[in-house]
Image: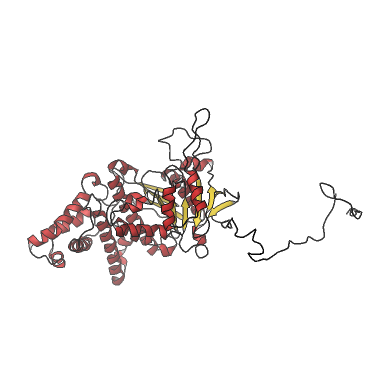
Protein backbone atom coordinates (compact mmCIF):
# COMPACT_ATOMS: atom_id res chain seq x y z
CA UNK A 1 0.00 0.00 0.00
CA UNK A 2 1.46 3.42 -0.92
CA UNK A 3 2.37 5.66 2.00
CA UNK A 4 -0.16 8.23 3.09
CA UNK A 5 0.24 11.69 1.60
CA UNK A 6 2.08 14.06 3.94
CA UNK A 7 0.11 17.26 4.44
CA UNK A 8 1.74 20.34 5.88
CA UNK A 9 -0.09 22.13 8.69
CA UNK A 10 -2.24 24.98 7.42
CA UNK A 11 -2.28 23.76 3.84
CA UNK A 12 -5.53 24.23 1.90
CA UNK A 13 -7.20 21.21 0.30
CA UNK A 14 -7.37 21.16 -3.53
CA UNK A 15 -10.74 21.64 -5.21
CA UNK A 16 -11.10 17.88 -5.81
CA UNK A 17 -9.72 16.87 -2.42
CA UNK A 18 -6.39 15.36 -1.39
CA UNK A 19 -5.16 12.56 -3.71
CA UNK A 20 -5.20 9.09 -2.11
CA UNK A 21 -6.59 10.71 1.03
CA UNK A 22 -8.67 8.75 3.54
CA UNK A 23 -10.33 9.43 6.88
CA UNK A 24 -10.03 6.99 9.74
CA UNK A 25 -13.04 8.49 11.46
CA UNK A 26 -16.09 10.45 10.28
CA UNK A 27 -17.62 12.67 12.91
CA UNK A 28 -21.44 12.16 13.07
CA UNK A 29 -23.73 15.13 12.70
CA UNK A 30 -24.91 16.94 15.80
CA UNK A 31 -28.52 16.88 17.01
CA UNK A 32 -29.88 20.10 18.47
CA UNK A 33 -33.14 20.39 20.39
CA UNK A 34 -35.01 23.59 21.09
CA UNK A 35 -38.42 24.94 22.00
CA UNK A 36 -40.71 26.72 19.56
CA UNK A 37 -39.50 30.01 21.11
CA UNK A 38 -35.83 29.23 20.52
CA UNK A 39 -36.33 28.01 16.95
CA UNK A 40 -39.19 30.33 16.03
CA UNK A 41 -37.79 30.79 12.55
CA UNK A 42 -38.24 27.09 11.80
CA UNK A 43 -41.58 26.43 13.49
CA UNK A 44 -44.35 25.81 12.50
CA UNK A 45 -42.88 23.57 9.82
CA UNK A 46 -44.38 24.36 6.41
CA UNK A 47 -43.87 20.91 4.89
CA UNK A 48 -45.16 17.70 6.43
CA UNK A 49 -43.26 14.46 6.28
CA UNK A 50 -43.84 12.39 3.15
CA UNK A 51 -45.75 9.14 2.95
CA UNK A 52 -43.91 5.86 3.60
CA UNK A 53 -42.08 4.61 0.50
CA UNK A 54 -43.98 1.33 0.31
CA UNK A 55 -47.04 0.16 -1.57
CA UNK A 56 -48.12 1.05 -5.10
CA UNK A 57 -45.81 3.66 -6.68
CA UNK A 58 -47.72 6.61 -8.13
CA UNK A 59 -45.12 9.18 -9.16
CA UNK A 60 -42.97 12.08 -7.90
CA UNK A 61 -44.08 14.51 -5.21
CA UNK A 62 -44.74 17.83 -6.97
CA UNK A 63 -43.03 19.72 -4.11
CA UNK A 64 -40.06 17.55 -3.14
CA UNK A 65 -39.61 15.20 -6.10
CA UNK A 66 -39.52 12.12 -3.88
CA UNK A 67 -41.42 8.97 -4.89
CA UNK A 68 -45.00 8.82 -3.57
CA UNK A 69 -46.59 5.43 -2.92
CA UNK A 70 -50.10 4.47 -1.82
CA UNK A 71 -50.52 1.47 0.46
CA UNK A 72 -54.16 1.22 1.70
CA UNK A 73 -53.78 -2.20 3.40
CA UNK A 74 -50.35 -1.44 4.84
CA UNK A 75 -51.46 1.84 6.39
CA UNK A 76 -54.29 0.27 8.40
CA UNK A 77 -53.40 0.42 12.08
CA UNK A 78 -50.74 3.10 11.64
CA UNK A 79 -51.98 5.92 9.40
CA UNK A 80 -55.58 4.78 8.85
CA UNK A 81 -58.32 2.60 10.32
CA UNK A 82 -60.02 1.71 7.01
CA UNK A 83 -58.43 0.57 3.73
CA UNK A 84 -61.15 2.03 1.47
CA UNK A 85 -60.17 4.80 -0.97
CA UNK A 86 -62.33 7.68 -2.25
CA UNK A 87 -61.32 9.15 -5.63
CA UNK A 88 -62.96 12.33 -6.93
CA UNK A 89 -62.31 14.75 -9.77
CA UNK A 90 -63.61 16.23 -12.99
CA UNK A 91 -64.16 13.94 -16.00
CA UNK A 92 -61.11 13.35 -18.17
CA UNK A 93 -58.55 14.15 -15.46
CA UNK A 94 -57.43 10.61 -14.65
CA UNK A 95 -59.71 9.07 -12.02
CA UNK A 96 -59.99 5.76 -13.85
CA UNK A 97 -56.25 5.75 -14.52
CA UNK A 98 -55.30 5.92 -10.84
CA UNK A 99 -57.95 3.31 -9.96
CA UNK A 100 -56.36 0.96 -12.49
CA UNK A 101 -52.84 1.76 -11.28
CA UNK A 102 -53.84 0.96 -7.70
CA UNK A 103 -55.63 -2.22 -8.78
CA UNK A 104 -52.69 -3.35 -10.91
CA UNK A 105 -50.18 -2.61 -8.17
CA UNK A 106 -52.18 -4.44 -5.53
CA UNK A 107 -52.45 -7.45 -7.85
CA UNK A 108 -48.65 -7.44 -7.87
CA UNK A 109 -48.73 -7.54 -4.07
CA UNK A 110 -50.92 -10.64 -4.07
CA UNK A 111 -54.41 -9.16 -4.32
CA UNK A 112 -57.12 -10.24 -6.75
CA UNK A 113 -59.15 -7.66 -8.67
CA UNK A 114 -62.91 -7.91 -9.11
CA UNK A 115 -64.64 -5.12 -11.04
CA UNK A 116 -68.32 -5.82 -10.28
CA UNK A 117 -69.73 -3.48 -12.93
CA UNK A 118 -67.84 -1.84 -15.82
CA UNK A 119 -70.23 0.40 -17.76
CA UNK A 120 -67.61 1.68 -20.21
CA UNK A 121 -65.64 -1.53 -20.78
CA UNK A 122 -62.63 0.38 -19.41
CA UNK A 123 -61.28 -2.57 -17.46
CA UNK A 124 -61.71 -5.13 -20.25
CA UNK A 125 -58.25 -4.53 -21.85
CA UNK A 126 -56.50 -4.64 -18.47
CA UNK A 127 -58.29 -7.79 -17.30
CA UNK A 128 -57.65 -9.50 -20.65
CA UNK A 129 -53.95 -8.57 -20.50
CA UNK A 130 -53.74 -10.08 -17.00
CA UNK A 131 -55.27 -13.35 -18.17
CA UNK A 132 -58.48 -12.69 -16.28
CA UNK A 133 -62.16 -13.30 -16.98
CA UNK A 134 -64.52 -10.79 -18.63
CA UNK A 135 -68.26 -11.50 -18.35
CA UNK A 136 -70.27 -9.42 -20.85
CA UNK A 137 -73.85 -8.86 -19.70
CA UNK A 138 -76.57 -7.69 -22.08
CA UNK A 139 -79.39 -8.83 -24.32
CA UNK A 140 -78.02 -11.60 -26.49
CA UNK A 141 -74.87 -11.79 -24.34
CA UNK A 142 -74.12 -13.34 -20.95
CA UNK A 143 -76.85 -13.34 -18.29
CA UNK A 144 -76.60 -13.12 -14.52
CA UNK A 145 -79.17 -14.37 -12.06
CA UNK A 146 -78.97 -12.05 -9.04
CA UNK A 147 -80.35 -14.95 -6.95
CA UNK A 148 -77.47 -17.24 -7.93
CA UNK A 149 -76.08 -18.99 -4.86
CA UNK A 150 -72.97 -20.32 -6.60
CA UNK A 151 -71.13 -23.38 -5.25
CA UNK A 152 -72.67 -22.88 -1.81
CA UNK A 153 -76.17 -23.50 -3.10
CA UNK A 154 -75.09 -26.51 -5.10
CA UNK A 155 -73.52 -27.99 -1.97
CA UNK A 156 -76.56 -27.49 0.27
CA UNK A 157 -77.55 -31.15 -0.02
CA UNK A 158 -74.27 -32.28 1.51
CA UNK A 159 -74.38 -29.91 4.49
CA UNK A 160 -75.69 -30.87 7.95
CA UNK A 161 -79.34 -29.94 8.43
CA UNK A 162 -78.66 -27.08 10.88
CA UNK A 163 -75.96 -25.53 8.72
CA UNK A 164 -78.02 -25.95 5.56
CA UNK A 165 -80.96 -24.13 7.18
CA UNK A 166 -78.69 -21.27 8.21
CA UNK A 167 -77.25 -21.00 4.70
CA UNK A 168 -80.73 -21.00 3.14
CA UNK A 169 -81.85 -18.22 5.49
CA UNK A 170 -78.80 -16.15 4.54
CA UNK A 171 -79.39 -16.66 0.82
CA UNK A 172 -83.10 -15.83 1.10
CA UNK A 173 -82.30 -12.67 3.07
CA UNK A 174 -79.87 -11.46 0.41
CA UNK A 175 -82.31 -12.23 -2.37
CA UNK A 176 -85.09 -10.33 -0.64
CA UNK A 177 -82.90 -7.28 -0.01
CA UNK A 178 -81.82 -7.19 -3.64
CA UNK A 179 -85.42 -7.36 -4.87
CA UNK A 180 -86.34 -4.49 -2.54
CA UNK A 181 -83.52 -2.40 -4.04
CA UNK A 182 -84.40 -3.26 -7.63
CA UNK A 183 -88.05 -2.43 -7.02
CA UNK A 184 -86.97 1.00 -5.77
CA UNK A 185 -85.71 1.88 -9.26
CA UNK A 186 -88.05 3.68 -11.70
CA UNK A 187 -88.29 0.48 -13.76
CA UNK A 188 -89.74 -1.30 -10.72
CA UNK A 189 -92.03 0.48 -8.27
CA UNK A 190 -90.02 3.68 -8.03
CA UNK A 191 -90.06 3.28 -4.23
CA UNK A 192 -89.20 0.79 -1.52
CA UNK A 193 -91.96 -1.81 -0.90
CA UNK A 194 -94.37 -1.04 1.93
CA UNK A 195 -94.48 -3.23 5.04
CA UNK A 196 -97.23 -5.52 3.72
CA UNK A 197 -95.60 -5.75 0.29
CA UNK A 198 -92.23 -6.47 1.87
CA UNK A 199 -93.64 -9.33 3.91
CA UNK A 200 -95.25 -10.86 0.82
CA UNK A 201 -92.05 -10.45 -1.19
CA UNK A 202 -89.83 -12.11 1.42
CA UNK A 203 -92.25 -14.99 1.86
CA UNK A 204 -92.49 -15.51 -1.92
CA UNK A 205 -88.69 -15.64 -2.22
CA UNK A 206 -88.51 -18.37 0.43
CA UNK A 207 -91.34 -20.40 -1.10
CA UNK A 208 -89.81 -20.15 -4.59
CA UNK A 209 -86.42 -21.32 -3.29
CA UNK A 210 -87.96 -24.25 -1.37
CA UNK A 211 -90.02 -25.39 -4.38
CA UNK A 212 -87.06 -25.65 -6.79
CA UNK A 213 -83.99 -27.85 -7.05
CA UNK A 214 -82.05 -24.91 -8.50
CA UNK A 215 -81.73 -21.22 -7.75
CA UNK A 216 -84.96 -19.29 -8.31
CA UNK A 217 -85.18 -16.43 -10.76
CA UNK A 218 -87.37 -13.33 -10.63
CA UNK A 219 -90.14 -14.92 -12.79
CA UNK A 220 -90.35 -17.77 -10.21
CA UNK A 221 -91.11 -15.23 -7.48
CA UNK A 222 -93.75 -13.64 -9.71
CA UNK A 223 -95.38 -17.06 -10.20
CA UNK A 224 -95.58 -17.65 -6.45
CA UNK A 225 -97.10 -14.22 -5.88
CA UNK A 226 -99.68 -14.78 -8.60
CA UNK A 227 -100.64 -18.21 -7.27
CA UNK A 228 -100.97 -16.93 -3.70
CA UNK A 229 -100.45 -20.19 -1.76
CA UNK A 230 -101.98 -20.45 1.67
CA UNK A 231 -98.70 -19.96 3.65
CA UNK A 232 -98.12 -16.69 1.79
CA UNK A 233 -101.67 -15.46 2.42
CA UNK A 234 -101.40 -16.30 6.10
CA UNK A 235 -98.07 -14.49 6.31
CA UNK A 236 -99.67 -11.17 5.29
CA UNK A 237 -103.06 -11.83 6.93
CA UNK A 238 -104.90 -11.68 3.61
CA UNK A 239 -106.98 -14.87 3.33
CA UNK A 240 -109.69 -13.35 1.13
CA UNK A 241 -108.90 -13.05 -2.58
CA UNK A 242 -109.71 -9.35 -2.72
CA UNK A 243 -107.47 -8.56 0.24
CA UNK A 244 -104.61 -10.62 -1.19
CA UNK A 245 -104.81 -9.00 -4.63
CA UNK A 246 -104.86 -5.53 -3.08
CA UNK A 247 -101.77 -6.35 -1.01
CA UNK A 248 -99.71 -7.82 -3.84
CA UNK A 249 -100.93 -6.08 -7.02
CA UNK A 250 -98.29 -3.31 -6.99
CA UNK A 251 -95.33 -5.52 -6.12
CA UNK A 252 -96.29 -8.03 -8.85
CA UNK A 253 -96.48 -5.20 -11.39
CA UNK A 254 -93.10 -3.91 -10.26
CA UNK A 255 -91.48 -7.33 -10.65
CA UNK A 256 -93.07 -7.75 -14.08
CA UNK A 257 -91.50 -4.44 -15.10
CA UNK A 258 -88.07 -5.77 -14.12
CA UNK A 259 -88.53 -8.63 -16.59
CA UNK A 260 -90.04 -6.63 -19.44
CA UNK A 261 -89.20 -3.61 -21.58
CA UNK A 262 -85.58 -2.39 -21.44
CA UNK A 263 -84.81 -4.83 -18.60
CA UNK A 264 -86.04 -7.93 -20.46
CA UNK A 265 -83.53 -10.73 -20.74
CA UNK A 266 -80.90 -9.16 -18.47
CA UNK A 267 -81.50 -10.51 -14.98
CA UNK A 268 -84.51 -12.80 -15.37
CA UNK A 269 -82.58 -15.87 -16.51
CA UNK A 270 -80.20 -18.34 -14.92
CA UNK A 271 -76.52 -17.36 -14.86
CA UNK A 272 -74.84 -18.37 -18.11
CA UNK A 273 -71.21 -17.80 -17.03
CA UNK A 274 -70.18 -18.12 -13.38
CA UNK A 275 -67.44 -15.89 -11.99
CA UNK A 276 -64.06 -17.64 -11.97
CA UNK A 277 -62.51 -16.33 -8.77
CA UNK A 278 -59.35 -18.34 -9.37
CA UNK A 279 -58.30 -15.80 -12.04
CA UNK A 280 -56.05 -12.85 -11.11
CA UNK A 281 -58.72 -10.40 -12.30
CA UNK A 282 -62.45 -10.61 -13.09
CA UNK A 283 -64.67 -7.95 -14.65
CA UNK A 284 -68.40 -7.77 -15.42
CA UNK A 285 -68.71 -5.71 -18.60
CA UNK A 286 -72.01 -3.78 -18.69
CA UNK A 287 -71.16 -1.54 -21.64
CA UNK A 288 -74.04 -3.07 -23.63
CA UNK A 289 -76.47 -1.40 -21.18
CA UNK A 290 -75.29 2.17 -21.80
CA UNK A 291 -77.70 2.68 -24.68
CA UNK A 292 -80.65 1.44 -22.58
CA UNK A 293 -80.70 4.54 -20.36
CA UNK A 294 -79.36 5.65 -17.01
CA UNK A 295 -81.95 3.80 -14.93
CA UNK A 296 -81.31 0.47 -16.64
CA UNK A 297 -77.56 0.94 -16.23
CA UNK A 298 -77.99 1.78 -12.53
CA UNK A 299 -80.20 -1.27 -11.92
CA UNK A 300 -77.65 -3.40 -13.77
CA UNK A 301 -74.84 -2.08 -11.59
CA UNK A 302 -76.78 -2.87 -8.43
CA UNK A 303 -77.66 -6.40 -9.56
CA UNK A 304 -74.08 -7.16 -10.59
CA UNK A 305 -72.65 -5.71 -7.37
CA UNK A 306 -75.01 -7.89 -5.32
CA UNK A 307 -74.15 -10.97 -7.38
CA UNK A 308 -70.41 -10.28 -7.15
CA UNK A 309 -70.37 -9.71 -3.40
CA UNK A 310 -72.52 -12.78 -2.87
CA UNK A 311 -70.05 -14.84 -4.92
CA UNK A 312 -67.19 -13.51 -2.79
CA UNK A 313 -68.88 -14.51 0.46
CA UNK A 314 -69.74 -17.94 -0.87
CA UNK A 315 -66.24 -18.60 -2.22
CA UNK A 316 -64.65 -17.50 1.03
CA UNK A 317 -67.02 -19.67 3.10
CA UNK A 318 -65.89 -22.72 1.11
CA UNK A 319 -62.21 -21.78 1.16
CA UNK A 320 -62.20 -21.14 -2.59
CA UNK A 321 -60.86 -17.60 -2.25
CA UNK A 322 -57.37 -17.51 -0.84
CA UNK A 323 -56.42 -13.94 -1.83
CA UNK A 324 -57.80 -10.62 -0.55
CA UNK A 325 -59.70 -8.53 -3.07
CA UNK A 326 -59.46 -5.05 -4.52
CA UNK A 327 -62.84 -3.81 -5.78
CA UNK A 328 -62.92 -0.75 -8.08
CA UNK A 329 -66.40 0.80 -7.87
CA UNK A 330 -66.29 3.22 -10.80
CA UNK A 331 -69.34 5.23 -11.88
CA UNK A 332 -70.72 4.86 -8.35
CA UNK A 333 -72.96 7.90 -8.77
CA UNK A 334 -75.09 6.10 -11.37
CA UNK A 335 -76.27 3.48 -8.89
CA UNK A 336 -76.83 5.99 -6.09
CA UNK A 337 -79.18 8.04 -8.26
CA UNK A 338 -81.28 5.07 -9.36
CA UNK A 339 -84.01 5.56 -6.75
CA UNK A 340 -84.96 5.82 -3.06
CA UNK A 341 -83.26 3.29 -0.84
CA UNK A 342 -80.42 2.56 -3.25
CA UNK A 343 -77.92 3.92 -0.73
CA UNK A 344 -79.16 1.40 1.83
CA UNK A 345 -78.55 -1.42 -0.60
CA UNK A 346 -75.10 -0.20 -1.58
CA UNK A 347 -74.13 0.53 2.02
CA UNK A 348 -75.04 -3.01 2.98
CA UNK A 349 -73.22 -4.50 -0.01
CA UNK A 350 -70.01 -2.54 0.54
CA UNK A 351 -69.94 -3.45 4.23
CA UNK A 352 -69.76 -7.18 3.46
CA UNK A 353 -66.26 -8.65 3.76
CA UNK A 354 -64.70 -5.57 5.36
CA UNK A 355 -63.29 -7.79 8.10
CA UNK A 356 -61.55 -9.91 5.42
CA UNK A 357 -59.35 -7.07 4.17
CA UNK A 358 -61.07 -6.23 0.88
CA UNK A 359 -60.28 -2.78 -0.47
CA UNK A 360 -63.07 -0.72 -2.07
CA UNK A 361 -61.95 1.97 -4.51
CA UNK A 362 -64.91 4.36 -4.88
CA UNK A 363 -64.96 6.95 -7.66
CA UNK A 364 -67.32 9.82 -8.39
CA UNK A 365 -67.35 13.25 -10.04
CA UNK A 366 -68.94 15.50 -7.45
CA UNK A 367 -70.30 15.70 -3.92
CA UNK A 368 -73.46 16.98 -5.58
CA UNK A 369 -74.00 13.42 -6.79
CA UNK A 370 -74.62 12.56 -3.14
CA UNK A 371 -76.58 15.74 -2.35
CA UNK A 372 -78.95 15.08 -5.29
CA UNK A 373 -80.33 11.89 -3.74
CA UNK A 374 -84.10 11.88 -3.16
CA UNK A 375 -84.32 11.66 0.64
CA UNK A 376 -82.46 13.20 3.57
CA UNK A 377 -81.79 9.72 4.95
CA UNK A 378 -80.16 8.65 1.67
CA UNK A 379 -78.04 11.81 1.58
CA UNK A 380 -76.79 11.26 5.12
CA UNK A 381 -75.89 7.62 4.48
CA UNK A 382 -74.19 8.48 1.18
CA UNK A 383 -72.03 11.03 2.98
CA UNK A 384 -71.04 8.23 5.34
CA UNK A 385 -69.63 6.26 2.40
CA UNK A 386 -67.07 9.03 1.88
CA UNK A 387 -66.42 9.66 5.57
CA UNK A 388 -65.46 6.01 6.14
CA UNK A 389 -62.68 6.28 3.54
CA UNK A 390 -59.47 7.30 5.32
CA UNK A 391 -57.61 7.74 2.01
CA UNK A 392 -58.86 10.59 -0.18
CA UNK A 393 -57.45 11.12 -3.69
CA UNK A 394 -58.53 14.41 -5.23
CA UNK A 395 -57.98 15.43 -8.85
CA UNK A 396 -58.69 18.77 -10.53
CA UNK A 397 -61.95 20.40 -9.35
CA UNK A 398 -63.38 23.93 -9.11
CA UNK A 399 -63.32 25.91 -5.87
CA UNK A 400 -67.01 25.38 -5.11
CA UNK A 401 -66.66 21.61 -5.22
CA UNK A 402 -63.55 21.68 -3.04
CA UNK A 403 -65.35 23.71 -0.39
CA UNK A 404 -68.12 21.10 -0.32
CA UNK A 405 -65.52 18.36 0.18
CA UNK A 406 -63.83 20.38 2.92
CA UNK A 407 -67.11 20.46 4.85
CA UNK A 408 -66.79 16.67 5.27
CA UNK A 409 -63.04 16.12 4.96
CA UNK A 410 -61.31 19.35 6.04
CA UNK A 411 -58.80 20.75 3.54
CA UNK A 412 -56.35 23.59 4.14
CA UNK A 413 -56.52 26.77 2.08
CA UNK A 414 -53.26 25.88 0.34
CA UNK A 415 -54.60 22.44 -0.61
CA UNK A 416 -57.78 23.94 -2.04
CA UNK A 417 -55.85 26.54 -4.04
CA UNK A 418 -53.47 23.92 -5.44
CA UNK A 419 -56.21 21.54 -6.61
CA UNK A 420 -58.26 24.41 -8.04
CA UNK A 421 -55.23 25.58 -10.04
CA UNK A 422 -55.20 22.21 -11.82
CA UNK A 423 -58.74 22.82 -13.09
CA UNK A 424 -57.73 25.82 -15.23
CA UNK A 425 -58.90 25.70 -18.84
CA UNK A 426 -56.52 24.17 -21.36
CA UNK A 427 -54.39 26.75 -23.13
CA UNK A 428 -53.35 26.68 -26.78
CA UNK A 429 -49.90 27.11 -28.25
CA UNK A 430 -48.79 29.70 -30.75
CA UNK A 431 -49.67 27.33 -33.57
CA UNK A 432 -53.18 26.85 -32.16
CA UNK A 433 -52.52 23.25 -31.10
CA UNK A 434 -54.17 22.17 -27.84
CA UNK A 435 -51.84 21.68 -24.89
CA UNK A 436 -52.13 19.03 -22.19
CA UNK A 437 -54.69 19.91 -19.51
CA UNK A 438 -52.79 21.25 -16.47
CA UNK A 439 -54.54 18.87 -14.09
CA UNK A 440 -54.28 15.68 -16.09
CA UNK A 441 -52.59 12.99 -14.01
CA UNK A 442 -52.17 15.22 -10.93
CA UNK A 443 -53.65 14.23 -7.56
CA UNK A 444 -53.61 15.30 -3.95
CA UNK A 445 -53.37 12.23 -1.71
CA UNK A 446 -54.92 12.97 1.65
CA UNK A 447 -54.44 10.35 4.36
CA UNK A 448 -56.52 10.92 7.45
CA UNK A 449 -55.88 14.42 8.84
CA UNK A 450 -52.30 14.64 7.49
CA UNK A 451 -51.40 17.37 5.05
CA UNK A 452 -52.07 16.22 1.51
CA UNK A 453 -49.26 15.10 -0.77
CA UNK A 454 -49.46 16.41 -4.37
CA UNK A 455 -48.27 13.89 -6.93
CA UNK A 456 -47.95 13.55 -10.68
CA UNK A 457 -48.68 10.04 -11.92
CA UNK A 458 -46.45 8.75 -14.69
CA UNK A 459 -47.73 5.94 -16.90
CA UNK A 460 -45.64 3.36 -18.68
CA UNK A 461 -46.24 2.88 -22.44
CA UNK A 462 -48.21 -0.30 -21.75
CA UNK A 463 -50.34 1.47 -19.15
CA UNK A 464 -51.02 4.27 -21.62
CA UNK A 465 -52.40 1.68 -24.01
CA UNK A 466 -54.43 -0.21 -21.39
CA UNK A 467 -55.68 2.80 -19.41
CA UNK A 468 -56.59 5.18 -22.25
CA UNK A 469 -60.30 6.03 -22.25
CA UNK A 470 -60.57 9.08 -24.52
CA UNK A 471 -60.42 7.28 -27.85
CA UNK A 472 -63.98 8.25 -28.78
CA UNK A 473 -63.21 11.94 -28.24
CA UNK A 474 -59.59 12.18 -29.43
CA UNK A 475 -58.39 9.87 -32.21
CA UNK A 476 -54.85 11.06 -31.52
CA UNK A 477 -53.29 11.62 -28.11
CA UNK A 478 -50.45 13.82 -26.99
CA UNK A 479 -47.04 12.20 -26.42
CA UNK A 480 -46.69 10.96 -22.87
CA UNK A 481 -50.43 11.24 -22.21
CA UNK A 482 -52.82 8.40 -21.58
CA UNK A 483 -54.64 9.14 -18.35
CA UNK A 484 -58.24 8.02 -18.41
CA UNK A 485 -61.34 9.73 -17.20
Picture coordinates of residue 315, whole percent (x, y): 38, 60
Image quadrant in which the N terminus is located: bottom right
Residue sitting at x 35%, y 53%? 370
Q: Is residue 66 left or right of residue 478?
A: right
Viewer-nearest residue: 50 or 116:
50
Q: Is residue 221 left or right of residue 334?
A: left
Viewer-nearest residue: 15 or 325:
15
Q: Is residue 365 left or right of residue 268?
A: right
Q: Is residue 64 visible?
A: yes
Viewer-nearest residue: 44 or 303:
44
Picture coordinates of residue 99, whole percent (x, y): 45, 49
Viewer-nearest residue: 145 or 258:
258
Residue sitting at x 7%, y 60%? 242
Picture coordinates of residue 417, whole percent (x, y): 50, 48
Q: Quadrant of residue 128?
A: top left
Image quadrant in which the C terminus is located: top left
Task: Using the image, determine if residue 348 lies above or below residue 295.
Answer: below
Picture coordinates of residue 73, whole percent (x, y): 49, 60
Q: Residue furthest top?
A: 431
- Count every numbered label the image shows and give the total: 0
Amino acid sequence: MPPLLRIEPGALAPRRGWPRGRAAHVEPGSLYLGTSVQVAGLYPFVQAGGLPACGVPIGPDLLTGELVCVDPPGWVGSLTTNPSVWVQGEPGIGKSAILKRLSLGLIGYGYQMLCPGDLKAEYTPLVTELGGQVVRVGRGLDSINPFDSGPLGRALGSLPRTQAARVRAELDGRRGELLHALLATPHGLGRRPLAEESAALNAAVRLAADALDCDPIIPDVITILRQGPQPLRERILAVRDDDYRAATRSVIAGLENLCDGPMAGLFDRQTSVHLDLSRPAVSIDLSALRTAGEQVAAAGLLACWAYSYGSIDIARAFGLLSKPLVLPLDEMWRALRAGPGMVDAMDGITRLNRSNGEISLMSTHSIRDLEALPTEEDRAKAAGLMERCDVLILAAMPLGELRRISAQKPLTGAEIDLIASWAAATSTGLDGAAQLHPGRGKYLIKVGTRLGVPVKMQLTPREQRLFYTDGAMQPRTLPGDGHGA
